[in-house]
Image (cartoon, rainbow, N blue to C red):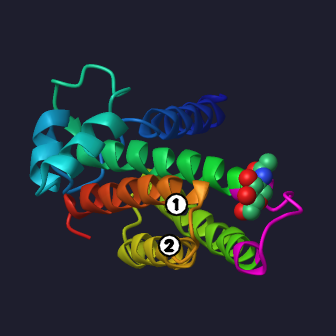
Amino acid sequence: MDTIPRLVRLLVLAVVSLTVAAADDVGCPGAPSMSVEAACRKACGTQLMYDVCRDSLRDVPDPSASHDVTGYALAAARGVLASEGATMDAAIQLLFNASLSGDEKSAYVECVESYTAAEEAIGNVLDDLPVCSFDGLAADYKNGLLDLENCRDRVIRLPASPLYAMVLVDRNKAVLAFFLGQLFGI
Ligand SMILES: *[C@@H]1O[C@H](CO)[C@@H](O)[C@H](O)[C@H]1NC(C)=O
């Protein structure tokens, strides 16, 4: 007599486990599957970006097997967020230095602002990829890149900044994340 409630419970469980599985092997309709190496070759036109790609996807289990490229895009986007977080912490740390020039101080303040926006943009990507929601995804990748470039264009004018190299690394990772996103046609 409790067949229907039991069915409902089973369905709920099935949906929950699908969602959990989706976290790494996303399986979005229409997204191709390939090995890590094939995805990096296809996404990247230069050796530099190919190397960034292999490094960003180094923790993918069983990399020579075919996986949905959406999972690669997700892993790369998580890498961007972690890297941006470290740069943001470094910028905040630099602001504690009382001997900064006015130019340095305003550049770092602007970087913290730009990075806050960049983290929000990649956060949108991280929300949308696991649910295969591709609308507006290209804009999120591009906006996140513009935010990083805004910071880069400020620190590049400083005599020497420990932040500069970090921003370049973040930008490479963000470009790579976007390239991987383009594999499923955004
Ligand atoms: C503080 O900033 C000045 C000016 O950029 C720099 O010369 C100095 O090395 C910095 N000090 C520390 C501890 O980072």
Measuring from the top left, give residue 90's x and y in whole percent: 69, 51
Q: Which residues are magenta?
A: 91-105
Q: Amino acid at mark 1?
A: Tyr
Q: Which residue is at 57% across, 69% downward?
A: 159
Q: Quadrant of residue 139?
A: bottom left
Give the amino acid at mark 2.
Answer: Ile
Quarter of the picture holding the C terminus: bottom left
Near-viewer residue (18 or 8): 18
Q: Residues within 10 Å of mark 1 (few under 14, many from 20)?
A: some
Is label 2's Cβ within 8 Å of ligand 1? no
Residue at 40% across, 59% down: 174
The tag earlier along the polypeptide, 2 or 1, is 2
Compared to 32, does 179 lie above or below? below
Image height check: is 82 above or below 165? above
Which residue carries the number 1 mark?
164
Residue 83 drawn at (x, y percent): 54, 47
Marks 2,1: beta carbons within 8 A: yes
The crowd level at tag 2 (other Cα within 10 Å; few <14, some 14-19, many 20+) is: some
Q: Secondary structure at mark 1?
A: helix
- Label 2 and label 1: CA atoms lie apart by 7 Å
Residue 180 vs 25, above or below: the answer is: below
Residue 20, x across and y down, in percent? 52, 34
Is-magenta flag for residue 95?
yes
Q: Which residue is mark 2?
A: 156
Residue at the location (10% across, 46% down)? Answer: 41
